[in-house]
Image: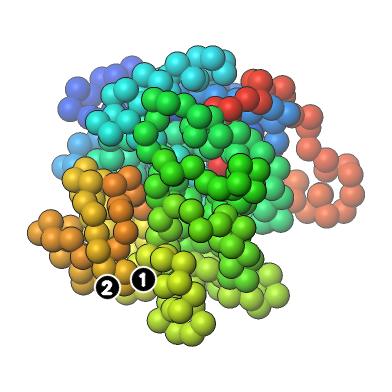
Amino acid sequence: MLVAGCAGRPKNVLLPVADTAPSSSRVEMLVTTTRSRSTNRGEMFTGERGLMPAFADITVSIPPKNVRKEGEVAWPKRLPPNPATDFATLKADELTLDAAKKWLSASVRKSPDRSVLVFIHGFNNRFEDSVYRFAQIIQDSGVQSAPVLVTWPSRGSLLAYGYDRESTNYTRNALENLFQYLARDPEVKEVSVLAHSMGNWLALESLRQMAIRNGRLPAKFKNVMLAAPDVDVDVFRSQIADMGKQHPQFTLFVSRDDRALALSRRVWGDIPRLGSIDPEQPPYKKELEANKITVIDLTKIKVSDDLNHSKFAESPQVVQLIGKRISEGQTLTDNRVGLGDQILVATTGTAAAAGNAAGLILAAPVAVVDQNTRDNYASQVGALTGPSAARKPAAKGCDAQPTTRCD
């Protein structure tokens, strides 16, 4: 039944099509990935691990608001997509490391505040899932930072939780390399990091490594958005401590009815996951206040995702709110933000939240179930029975240098 629910959505949607809808919007992004290259141009990168990071320049066409609801990815119902009604890929070019650096430099110069937004997706994401979801968030929030998608090797299957988790560990050094490059680049004045679900583990570990290596985190790393983080609360305490007193403004988005994190809690020994805590209860309230972590509780938000793991991108009010904060560069003053205040800000422009939110946007959900689950079932069972199911060797990617990073 779960597999049948999304059986109608086509895959491999990244083959570029002609730009036939002048009224559609365009979102350009730099992609860095530790995934292996695919022989299928419409897929570009698989869920397997590449030997070295690779880069891509991707442009996504997004249909106008009278066709698509905000918070929604208008997946094509058939291929090729129709740019007038569907998300469609207009450009998908692989880049060398030097070309990626040039792309980033040009995009940063276009940003009003010379800022960069790094997005790191979560569990159960195919490459195209992360591309289209990030494009939706950029479009709906109105953020003007240079957009960098970091995409790590996720097999896009509910059966591959363990593999996906190890893939985040596999990607830590590459993400730190990206962070180090952004820290050194004099053109970049501000960096915001947006992570969702399992991607939070990767983001926090890479920031922790960077802080230990450098003695502290750079001041230009202003904001880190932790959306539905699939992270052990005890481990999070140690990660924050290792980053030292000079750390970014953390904003934590929680939802106590997140069923995906409830399942993860059972997998990880019944230790609470950071994204599903009650921030008003001890010991969390005191610890969050001591570390000046802003908390936004979205428990009462209702979205179409039955697992309640995708509230951050699917709620138009929340996405609009964050986009408004980014575009206006508001300085917010209250450390505890109520949902009613969130909506008030979105509609009236009244500041009612905490911290410097000049580069923040909300996290994107994963596609919780799709037809790829069926495709991956046989390989996952085979992986449990022996080496016969071992993955194919990863294709060699680009030079693993500063701008390389995936999510």
Residue 124 or residue 372, whichever sits in front: 124
Q: Residue at horizontal 49%, vertical 85%? A: 282
The single residue placed furthest to the left in the displayed view is: 348
As helix, strand or loop, the secondary structure at mark 2 comes to loop
Residue 114 shows in the view = yes
Tag 1 and tag 2, C-beta contact below 8 Å? yes
Residue 256 visible to the viewer: no
Give how far apart the Cα atoms at labels 1 and 2 are.
7 Å
Q: Which residue is mark 2?
A: 338
Where 355 falls versus 328 (above or below)? below
Q: Measuring 13% from the left and 61% from the top, which residue is drawn there?
A: 350
Q: Nearer the viewer, residue 146 or 343?
A: 146
What residue lies at 89% left-to-right and 49% top-to-bottom?
386
**Total label count?**
2
The C terminus, quarter of image = top right
Amino acid identity at mark 2? Gly
The residue closer to the viewer here, 124 or 284, is: 284
Query: Which residue is label 1 attached to?
Result: 297
Going by the numbered disc 1, the residue's amino acid type is: Asp
